[in-house]
Amino acid sequence: MIVFDNVSKQYPDGTMGVDGLSFTADEGQITVLVGPSGCGKTTSLRMINRLLEPTGGSILVGDADVMSQNVVALRRQIGYVIQNSGLFPHRTVLGNVASLPIMLGMSRKDARARAHELLETVGLDASYAKRYPWQLSGGQQQRVGVARALATDPPYMLMDEPFSAVDPITRAQLQQEFLRIQSEVGKTIVMVTHDIDEALTLGDRIVMLRTGGHLAQNATPRELLRNPADEFVANFVGRARGYGALGFTSDVQLDIQPARSVRIGEQTANDDEWLVAVDDESRPLGWLRTDDEGIAQHADVEHATIITRADGTLRDIMDAALSSPNGRGILVHEDGTLRGVITLEEVTRAIRVSKGL
Amino acid sequence: MLDFFFDPENWSGGNGIPMRTLAHLAYTFIALGIAAAIAVPLGILIGVTGRGEALIAGLANALRALPTLGLLILIVMLVAPLISSSLAFTIPAIIVLVLLAVPPILTGTYSGIQNADRNAVQAARGMGYTTGQILWRVQVPMALPLIMSGLRGALLQVVSTATVAAFVSLGGLGRYIIDGRATQDYPQMLAGALLVAVLALALELLFMLLERFVVSPGLQRKTTSGAALATA
C-alpha cells in the first residue's frame, strides 16, 4: 500500500508543484495519476521513490514514511519504468534485465535465467536477448523496461508515462499485455499518464489532478465517467464519457435471439436470407447470403463483421451490431461457439436501461 | 632519402631507428599516462557535478593556444636550474607534452559524462543504484566512446609534438629532424618526418582497434550478429 497524506511540494521560488494531496494506492491494484501538464502528477510519482522530496505531509510506502527510510533501500523495493525506457545503451537486452539482480548479489546464472523468463513474460522472443537497445523498436524497448523493473520482484512499481512514446496500435497492444502481466504478478502500481483513455483502460482507481497539484477527483473509472466531480473533470474526461463509457461490463439482461446458421460447404435453402456461417466447431465466421447454387462458400462470408462475446461490454456488443451488414450482431459463448444474434434496437434498449433512462 | 633507410648503420645502436622510436614512444606514453591520470578524474568530476565547466573549457583552449616550442624553452629555463641531472631536460619536455594532452582528454571525458543518456541515469537512480554505482556502471561506460576519442586525439598530438624534445637535446625521432637541419642533411630530415608520420598512423590504427574492444557494441551502432532491425 502507498499512502499520500496531505503531501505538498513547494519549489524554492514559492510555486506549488503539489498541494495537500491525499490518496491511497491499494495493495495489488493499479492507481493512475492523470491530469493536464503542470498538474503535479509526475512530481507526485517521483516523490514516492524520493527522486524528489516532499516539503509537506507524508508518503507511506508499506508502513513507513519514505523520508525515514534509507533512500537506496526504498528504491530497491520499487520497480521503476519511465517513458523513454531509460535502458542502458551499453548493455544487451539480457544485461539490462539482469544487471540489478546481479548487483544485489544474485548469481549470474540465476539472474540470467530469471531475465530470460521475464523477457518471455513481456512477450520478447529469446532471440532479442543479445541485442542492444538501439536495435529495438520503441515498443520493444518499453517491454524490456517493464521486464527490468520486475527483475528483482519488487512489491511496488512506479510507471511514468510508460506507453506514451509508442504509436497508438503498439500502445493498445502493450496496455492489454500489461494488464495480463499485472493479473499474474499483482504488484501495487502507481502510474502517471496524461491520456484519459489509458487511465480508464488500465486504472483500478484514478486520481485526477488539476493544475497546481490539487486533487480533482479520486474514483474508479466507472464512477469517474458516471459522476464527474465538477466541470474540470467532466471536460478532461471529455469524449470518453460518451461512447467510451460503454466500455464497462454491464449487468443489463440482453435479449439474445437464436441465429440461423450454416456450415461452410453445406447446402443452404435458397431463400435469399442472411445466415451465420460457422466452421466445423460451430464457431461463427461472419454473415453469409445464400447464392443461386445454394452452397455456403467461404468466399461469400462477410469477414468484416465484428464478432464478440455475449458477456462482453456494451461497447463491444454495439460494435458487433454496427459492423454487421444487417444490423444484427453475432454473439459467441466463452469458448467461441455461436450464442445467437442481437439487434441494434436491443443494444440501444440495453444502453438506456444501463443509464437508468 | 632511400639511402638513409637502406644504411644498416641507421638501424642499430643508440642512434638507430629502433632505439629512437622506442625513446619517442616512451616520451609519448609517459606524457599520455600522466595527462590521463590528471584529466580523466578531473573530467569525471566536472561532468558529474556540472561545475567548473566554463573555467576548464577556457583553460583548455588557452593551453591549446600556447606555442609549444616557446613553452618548452620557458620551462627548461625555469626548471633546469633546479635539477642537476639529465632530467633537467626530460622533465620540461614531459611537462609540455602533458599540457598538450590534457585538454582533449579533459574535454572528451566531461562531455562524455554530461552527454550520457539522461534517461538511463535517471532510471538507474530510480532503481536504487548508489551514486558510485551510477558513475561506474552507467555513466562511465556510456562516456567511453568520447573518453577514448579524447585519448586518441591527445595521443596523436603528443606523438607528433614529441619531436620538439629533440630541440632541447633529448632523444626520439625528432633528433633526425633537428640534427639533419643542423648539418643540412635534408634526406635525414625528411626521413625523420616520415618516421614520425608513420608512427602516428600506426598508433592511430592500434587505438582504433583498442576502442573496438573497450567500448560496448551497444554504443558503436554496429550489428555484431548482422541481425536485421525488428519492426514490431
Image: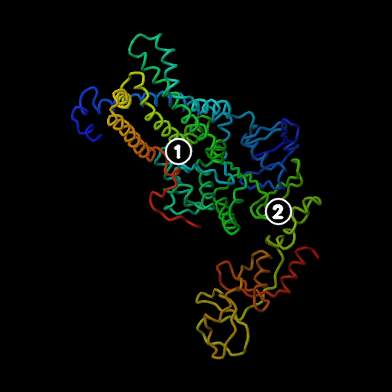
Q: Nearer the viewer, residue B191 or A145?
A: B191
What residue is shown with label 2? A221
Q: Chain of mark 2?
A: A
Disc assigned to residue A214: none
Q: Is residue A131 above or below residue B98?
A: below
Q: Is residue A313 left or right of residue A89?
A: right
In the image shown, does A77 or B22 lie closer to the viewer? Answer: B22
Say few, some or many: other residues with alpha carbon within 10 Å of mark 1 (under 14 / 14 to 19 / 20 or more): many
Q: CA distance from mark 2 to mark 1?
A: 48 Å
Q: Residue at x 59, y 43 (%)?
A: A157
Disc 2 crowd rating (10 Å Cα; few below 14, some 14-19, many 20+) is many
Residue drawn at (50%, 29%) of the image: B44
Contact, mark 2 vs mark 1 (Cβ under 8 Å): no
Q: Is residue A215 left or right of residue A298?
A: right
Q: How many callouts does the rendering have?
A: 2
- Asked if residue A94 can be seen in this view, the reply is no
Task: Identify whether A171 is placed above or below A317.
Answer: above
Q: Position of residue A42 (x, y in %)?
A: 66, 42
Q: Which residue, given by chain and number where applicable, does mark 1 sit on? A: B145
Q: Is residue B15 visible?
A: yes
On the image, the x and y values in percent for residue B33 come to 39, 25
User: What's the residue type where badge 1 is placed?
Assistant: Pro
Q: Quadrant of residue A329?
A: bottom right
Q: What residue lies at 42% left-to-right and 44% top-to-bottom?
A: B217
**Image height check: is A279 above or below A226?**
below
Rendering coords of residue B115 (x, y %): 53, 37
Tell which subunit mark 1 falls on: B
Q: Element under label 1?
A: helix
Q: Quadrant of the N terminus of chain B?
A: top left
Q: Indicate how the structure is coloured in the image.
A: rainbow
Residue B133: x and y, percent? 49, 32
